[in-house]
Amino acid sequence: MLVRFKHLSTRLATVLGLGLLCASVTACDTSDGESPEPEAHQGAAEDGARTPFDRGEDAAFEAAVEAQAAGWQHAFGQFLFRHETFDGNGRTCQTCHTKSSGALSPAQVEAAWADDPDGPLFRALDSDDGTGSSYDRLREDATVLVNIALPDGWTLVDDPAATTVTFRRGIPTIVNTAALDPVLMYDGRNASLQEQAHGAINGHAEPGRQPTEAELDAIAAFQQINRFFSNKKLRKWAQGKAPAPELPPGGTDAEIRGREWIVPSVEGVCGHCHGGTMLNETTEFLLAPLPPGTRFFTAFVSEFNNAGNPVHTFEVDNGDGTTTIFDSPDPGRAMITGDLADLNAFKIPSLWGAHNTAPYFHDNSAANFDELNVHYSEYFQAIGLDPLSAQDIEDIGAYLELLE
Ligand code: HEC
Ligand code: HEC
């Protein structure tokens, strides 16, 4: 480790914004968020020749490549995550997955708009009409557009020639994701972080060149450094250094009552789906014949469509001479599996750190925990359970705030 460490020049470490005081690569926490950014436009090639490093921030890019060669893969990944590298539309991962939460809220979109309405977030592909003339949806809901291919045998009734469907989706946090969640995306469509990053670069950044495998590996490595865990206990558990964290006991009466909803039991209804260490999988109490550990389910977010998103009519060829026709603003997991049993099912997200990542649900339809719990109260009634009282809503909200 020390030998490797010596390979890094002070200049290199400074350019990358990495402290030189850490004793080993793994002990290096590049989590500060205050690290000096590489100087832009240093040493640009003057002779007009395009080189791989001739990207405006070429000196820093070169240093980042050097870091990768020295074994500092996550440092290379940090550079790629934060800096426009693929000759695209200016967007980086960090344009949408912000330093403060790993996600993006309407307030953050508004701040970016106030700072620069021509900034990289505001690109025609995510505008209201596709031409870039207005960004009302993005500014109000903080949703971007995601294109998903129709499964075999599926057609859109109002657009029979369509092969893909565009959905409005919120930006989930990437905190705890890379190291602790093998299921990626709201609909679980990506099998690896590398495949995910490849899709993100092509789906959001309109790249002029494709990322290399080494670059995708580095982006995946960066997303597993210390700053991407919501708390130390989860990090130590992920690194095999400590037992899995348990639900905190709660201090106030409201918190102690709120906890009862989360601990899986017949009455602890939230715990029917938010079980396991990550609070993101079904338990044996689920009122549906699915095995414990199931990761996709419907919480009636598409069914209720409180976001008011455009509703599509789908026609599915059942393969036996019959067809099924249904409406949905976003069928979620079913678009990936083609299986109607997955209709409107989405990944059950973790509750750790959720207090930091409002708005909630795949369509950002719940602005805060109160709205989320009002949604659940309506969902409970729709499946024949009692609604939540105002006290329950307060209690559950108070307890969710404790889940660091
Ligand atoms: C324009 C905004 C935008 C940019 C830029 C962007 N993302 Fe995302 N990211 C999203 C959205 C939206 C989703 C959820 C999409 C879905 O599930 O359909 C997402 C999902 C993810 C997830 C999965 C989270 C989960 O809970 O499963 C990861 C990991 C991720 N992004 C990493 C990246 C990386 C790495 C980059 C840069 C290469 C990047 N993103 C660039 C908007 C963005
Ligand atoms: C039947 C399964 C189920 C039950 C019961 C359930 N959830 Fe969920 N939860 C989900 C699913 C699925 C999602 C994602 C839904 C979507 O985005 O469409 C979700 C999303 C959430 C989120 C959003 C997290 C984020 O990062 O966006 C929170 C918070 C949450 N649930 C809390 C609760 C609470 C509190 C309760 C009890 C009042 C509860 N859940 C009950 C399945 C469930």
Image: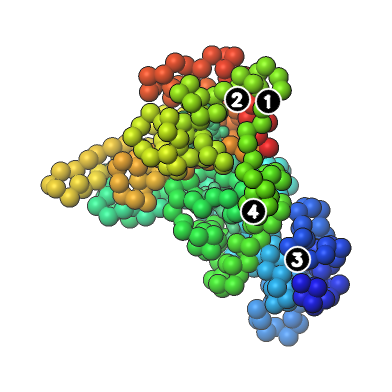
> Relative to residue 300, is residue 81 depicted above or below?
below
> Looking at this view, is 30 or 294 the one in front?
294
Instruction: Answer with left or right where residue 311 lies relative to residue 403.
Output: left
Is residue 96 something that shows in the picture? no
Question: Is label 2 within 8 A of ligand 2 (CB to nearest ligand atom)?
Answer: no
Which numbered disc, 4 or 3, marks the residue that appears first in the sequence? 3
| Helix, strand or loop status at disc 2 | helix
Residue type pointed to by label 4: Gly
Which numbered disc, 4 or 1, marks the residue that appears first in the sequence? 4
The residue that label 4 is drawn on is: 240
- The image quadrant that residue 358 belongs to is top right
Residue under the point 76% across and 82% down: 46
Residue under the point 14% across and 48% down: 320
Which numbered disc, 2 or 1, marks the residue that appears first in the sequence? 1
Question: Is label 4 within 8 A of ligand 1 (CB to nearest ligand atom)?
Answer: no
Residue type pointed to by label 1: Gly
Question: Is there CB contact under 8 Å for labels 4 and 3?
Answer: no
Q: CA distance from mark 4 to mark 3?
A: 18 Å
The residue carrying pointer 2 sits among few (fewer than 14), some (14 to 19) or many (20 or more) residues within 10 Å by Cα, namely: many
Is residue 264 something that shows in the picture? yes
Name the image quarter holding the C terminus.
top right
Instruction: Answer with left or right where residue 216 lies relative to residue 82.
Output: left
> Relative to residue 85, is residue 174 depicted above or below?
above
Which numbered disc, 4 or 2, marks the residue that appears first in the sequence? 4
The residue carrying pointer 3 sits among few (fewer than 14), some (14 to 19) or many (20 or more) residues within 10 Å by Cα, namely: some
Which numbered disc, 3 or 2, marks the residue that appears first in the sequence? 3
Instruction: Answer with left or right where residue 253 lies relative to residue 160.
Output: right
Question: Is there CB contact under 8 Å for labels 2 and 1?
Answer: yes
Residue under the point 70% across and 77% down: 69
Residue 395 location (% of width, % of height) = 62, 20
> Relative to residue 334, is residue 287 depicted above or below?
above
The residue that label 3 is drawn on is: 25
